[in-house]
Image (cartoon, helix red, strand yellow):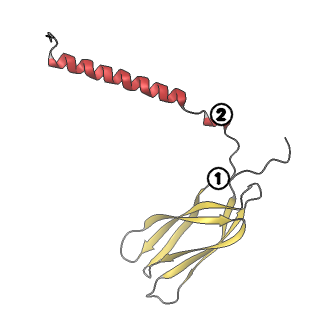
Amino acid sequence: MHDRSDTPAKSASHSTARRGRRTLALGLCALALLPRSTAHAGPSCKPMLSILEARAVRVSPIQPYTWKATVLADAHFCATTSGMFEIDFVRAAEVGPDLQMTEAFRWRAGQFKIELELGADEWVLEHRIGFIAPCVCRDPPFK
């Protein structure tokens, strides 16, 4: 027979301390096994995007309409010719508060058009290019 001379509170704190040491040891092992990505990462490239023109195309004041924009992608230092980017909008509505929203689009090298459909009682107050996904860099002309 086992003699349990520990009080329940004492054995519970001993169990918690053991679990804490085990968690700490596992955490340290995980940190040691993480790859050193910052030490081996190459340069990160992104295309330079700019919105040349934005306009609303309405057929009727009571039907949904399209917000259209012409975007220019300068990707001369990217090895890829397309990728993802986001535009952040502030959308206003006749009934309700202004809302910030983000829409994802695909860029192509050169000039291209994008569209966003909005309700009849909505309009874009502001817009800006947000996140641009990195592209694969071209090899530099010198080494």
The part of the image, by quadrant, that contains residue 55 is: bottom right
Q: Quick one: label 2 or label 1, which is nearer the N terminus?
A: 2
Above or below, 63 against 136 in this view is below
- Amino acid type at circle 2 is Ala
Q: In the visual, does 54 lie left or right of 29?
A: right
Q: Image point 38% across, 26% down: which residue?
A: 23
The part of the image, by quadrant, that contains residue 1 is: top left
Residue 134 circle label: 1
Q: Image point 42% across, 23% down: which residue?
A: 25
Q: Report helix, strand or loop for mark 2.
A: helix
Q: Residue furthest right?
A: 142
- Amino acid type at circle 1 is Pro
In three-dimensional space, the C-alpha distance between marks 2 and 1, rounded to whole angstroms, equals 18 Å
- Neighbours of disc 2 within 10 Å: few (<14), some (14-19), many (20+): few
Along the viewing direction, whichever of 4 and 16 lies nearer the viewer:
4
* Picture coordinates of residue 24, whole percent (x, y): 40, 24
Along the viewing direction, whichever of 46 and 31 lies nearer the viewer:
31
* Picture coordinates of residue 89, whole percent (x, y): 51, 66
| Location of mark 2 (residue) | 39
Q: Report helix, strand or loop for mark 1.
A: loop
